[in-house]
Image: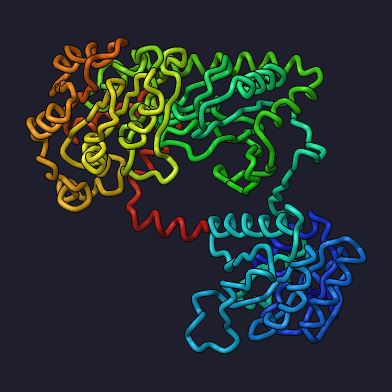
Amino acid sequence: MSADQKKYYTVERGHQILISLLKQHGIRKIVASPGTTNMTFVGSVMNDPFFEVYSSVDERSAAYIAVGMAEESGEAVVITCTGATASRNYMPGLTEAYYRKLPILAVTATQNENRIGHLIPQVLDRSTPPKDVCVLSEHVDVPQNANDEWDATIRLNRALLALNHHGGGPVHINLATGYSKDFSVKELPTARCIRRYMPYDKLPPLPKGRIGIAVGSHLPWSASLTDAVNSFCKAYGAVVFCEHGSNYSGPFRVYNAIVGQQLMYTKPLLLADVLIHIGEVSGYGKAGVDSLGEVWRVNEDGEIRDHYHKLSNVFEMKEEEFFLKYAAEAGDRTEQQENGKIWIEQCRAEYRELNDRIQDLPFSNLWIAWQTAHRLPKNSVLHLGILSSLRAWGLFEVTPSLCENGFANTGGFGIDGCMSSMIGGAIVRPDKLHFLVIGDLAFFYDMNVIGNRHIKNNVRILLVNNGKGTEFRNYSHPTSQFGEDADPFMAAAGHYGNKSPFLVRHMAEDLGFEYLHASGKDEYLKNVDRFLTAEKTEKPMIFEVFTTSEDESDALKLINTLKADTITKAKIELCSAIPHPLKRALKKIIN
């Protein structure tokens, strides 16, 4: 074969990612069965001296050959076949491997899934394999853009990690192909490899750079977990980026959602060299911090959750155990510790600067949060409704020593159940005042609960009533292009009394609540002291505040643009000047 005819790696990105990950995991042995659909995979690995490629015409035999290889060598073994019924013949061997927990990776080649069921030759439905032939099955389409490549990377990493996870076993990858004949790629691109570490593994060292901890929604912390994180931060100069639902109140806490919300300037203080991600789903005003290099996730579930698209390591262990182990092994990191002290002070100064830039806001949920968040009484708990309330109050720090915990229904991230969740918390902790900030749609969606007979006088509900889902009328929301036409069906305006001044009042008072109301700033400030009183009142409270979607949108725009730098501002203005059809065309070209 002449030099210009020599074959290297396929140009198909899904195959390149898989081959790169196989090499990084040290998986060499491959048993290939003949076919056309798996040509791109086989044609790539057979020309790479790293791999040991064997041939088996009969796929049933190929799977059992892999069983023998795996049990003798202790290594993972790949089997690969074409489309049609070839993969069906793997089942006996994979069943054997399943019950013996042997790490066999079945790579079945396929055309794209959208061809299933259309009487196209050699296209089978492999979406539901028998329960006892593999511990995990992943389908990987032909990547068409960067997001598809990210998806393929996650699915393929998850598949390879499953080969040895919790005892391991056979894994199935249904790998789509475009039948490319181009094998001209001489240098295989290195795919992002994600590793999983268990408590008994030797853990990788942390680099000597900025170490950030991003905390999503998190249940209340134990004293021992707080101490472990504090010890870690002290040893590494780390900073803990929080939101209301993070519930960390230690000395290394940074509350910077308002910084992350800014659109008109770059934010280098929100970049860490390594970002340690703990907790679950973040709220709208998430911690905002990002990683310059990699993200480490610490969670007992051990799952790949690539929120930042930079995940490199998953630690399947208790958070407390992770932080204690690394704190004990930190060694001398004096310079890193000093840099960490500077970093945390810079982050806090930036938060203060932005808050100082707020001169005034229209009467809105944001204005209310700005005026109120820092005044919540001691021994209180804050619940936030989805979505405007969560974002608005997420921009302003609540003093941790006063408001002990914060919660929001970010799991399902729907408007239903926000009030019921708060009532449930108030029932089990009658010693604490429970505050809820909620919009009108979410309030009426969940209104049945305010008639519950278990409600006590530790409940305070702040209802921001603008007569619609004001989120859909915000200047930055995709539906804003419809203007007032968005009201009838997108923003669901006009329901539930259409901002009636009597409906909630009568309902609240008839159900035994104390009712307060405000339609402007002066009236709000007149009533808020009563609403925030630290003493238990005779009755629970509902404080209804009437705002407009126009004021809500204007306030959000002001908050998002408190500070600007020349370059970022110019980029945004240029981007906004480009027509949407041209933007789509440019994105297509870039992809």
Looking at the image, residue 229 sits to the left or right of residue 449; the answer is: right
Question: Residue 99 at what x, y percent from top left?
Answer: 76, 67
Question: Residue 107 at what x, y percent from top left?
Answer: 71, 71
Identified at 18% across, 46% down, the residue is: 483
Residue 324 seen in this snapshot: yes
Residue 353 seen in this snapshot: no
Q: Residue at the far right: name it.
A: 72
Q: How many marks?
A: 0
Looking at the image, residue 515 sits to the left or right of residue 457; the answer is: left
What is the basis of the colouring in this image? rainbow
In what quadrant of the picture does the N terminus appear? bottom right
Question: Residue 115 at what x, y percent from top left?
Answer: 51, 80
Identified at 62% across, 48% down, the residue is: 303
Looking at the image, residue 403 sits to the left or right of residue 459; the answer is: right
Q: Nearer the viewer, residue 182 or 229?
A: 229
Give the image quarter of residue 8.
bottom right
Give the image quarter of residue 581.
bottom left
Question: Residue 401 at what x, y percent from top left?
Answer: 46, 12
Q: Nearer the viewer, residue 349 or 249?
A: 249
Give the image quarter of residue 558.
top left
Identified at 37% across, 21% down, the residue is: 430
Q: Nearer the viewer, residue 187 or 56?
A: 56
Q: Nearer the viewer, residue 153 or 185?
A: 153
Looking at the image, residue 319 sits to the left or right of residue 480; the answer is: right
Q: Indicate whether 543 appears above or below 18.
A: above
